[in-house]
Amino acid sequence: PRKPASKVSTRADGYKRVTVGRKGKGKQVYAHRAAAGVGHVKGSKTGKTGGVVHHKNKRKGDNRRSNLKVTTKAENNRRR
């Protein structure tokens, strides 16, 4: 089981990052990738897939599972 997030920060581009893990040994992960269950960061090999996480309502801070969809990079680029 995952440890609860201990620190949340928002990047300048609007994406939220959370620190998970033991105090002092935690890792920063993108909240939308963690919520979608696809790994830590873009291109991560540790998750289920290396896919891109798309926010359906285009709000980067809305990381509800119902608002996230795992897509390919090509599919995500078509949506832009």
Image (cartoon, rainbow, N blue to C red):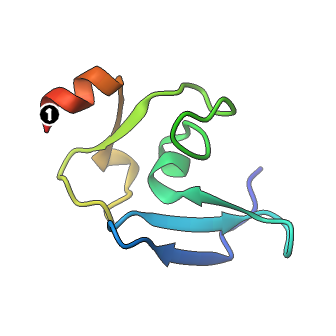
In depth, the one of 46 and 67 nearer the eye is: 46
* Quadrant of the image occupied by residue 19: bottom right
Q: Report the residue at 75% width, 62% height from top.
A: 3
Q: Is 69 drawn above or below residue 4 in the view shown?
A: above
- Position in image of residue 59 (x %, y %): 23, 60
Residue marked by disc 1: 79
Q: Along the horizontal axis of the image, is 9 left or right of 28?
A: left
In depth, the one of 26 and 36 nearer the eye is: 26
Q: Report the residue at 45% width, 66% height from top.
A: 16
Q: Is 41 drawn above or below residue 43 in the view shown?
A: below
Element type at mark 1:
helix
Quarter containing the C terminus: top left
- Position in image of residue 74 (x %, y %): 27, 21
Q: Is 33 drawn above or below residue 6 in the view shown?
A: above
* Quadrant of the image occupied by residue 29: bottom right
In depth, the one of 12 and 24 nearer the eye is: 12
- Position in image of residue 31 (x %, y %): 50, 58
Q: Is 56 drawn above or below residue 19 in the view shown?
A: above
Q: Along the horizontal axis of the image, is 26 left or right of 67?
A: right
Q: Amino acid at mark 1?
A: Arg
Q: Report the residue at 38% width, 58% height from top.
A: 63
